Image (spheres, rainbow, N blue to C red):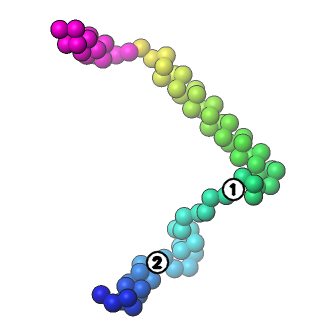
Amino acid sequence: MTRESRQKDSAADEPQGEMAAASKPKQGVRKKDLTPEQANELRSRQRAIGHELRRIFDDVTREPVPEEFLELLKQIDGKNEG
């Protein structure tokens, strides 16, 4: 395959028009480039995500350990002792 044919093939694979802009990955935005309002919104979203993750984690840690899992741990402990 020649260089020209590879370029043509790759150009044909790229989306055209509005689809091209929508499918390209967005560049990361640096915090220093944000307006104060945008920075506040970003911090607010990050706080909300953190609170939700903590809530979910707390719910999981309060769940009882399944009996089958406890039995497996006992079996492992017995093998390690013997």
Say whether residue 51 is left or right of residue 11.
right
Residue shown at 69% from the left, 56% from the top: 30
Q: Percent from the top left, x then y, of residue 19?
A: 53, 73
Question: Magenta stretch: residue 81 in it?
Answer: yes
The residue sitting at 52% across, 22% down in the picture is: 59
The mark found on residue 30 in the picture is 1
Q: Is residue 50 magenta?
A: no
Of callouts 1 and 2, the N-terminal one: 2
Q: Position of residue 27 (x, y in %)?
A: 61, 63
Q: Is residue 12 visible?
A: no
Would you name the residue on which mark 2 appears? 14
**SS assignment at label 2:** loop
Residue 43: percent from the left, percent from the top?
72, 42
Image location (x, y in percent) of residue 70? 31, 13
Give the SS element for disc 1. loop
* Observer-nearest of 23 and 73: 73
Viewer-closest of 19 and 9: 9
The C terminus is located in which quarter? top left
Residue 20 vs 66, above or below: the answer is: below
User: Is any atom of residue 59 visible in this view?
Assistant: yes
Residue type beneath disc 2: Glu
Q: Which residues are magenta?
A: 65-82
Q: Residues within 10 Å of mark 1 (few under 14, many from 20)?
A: few
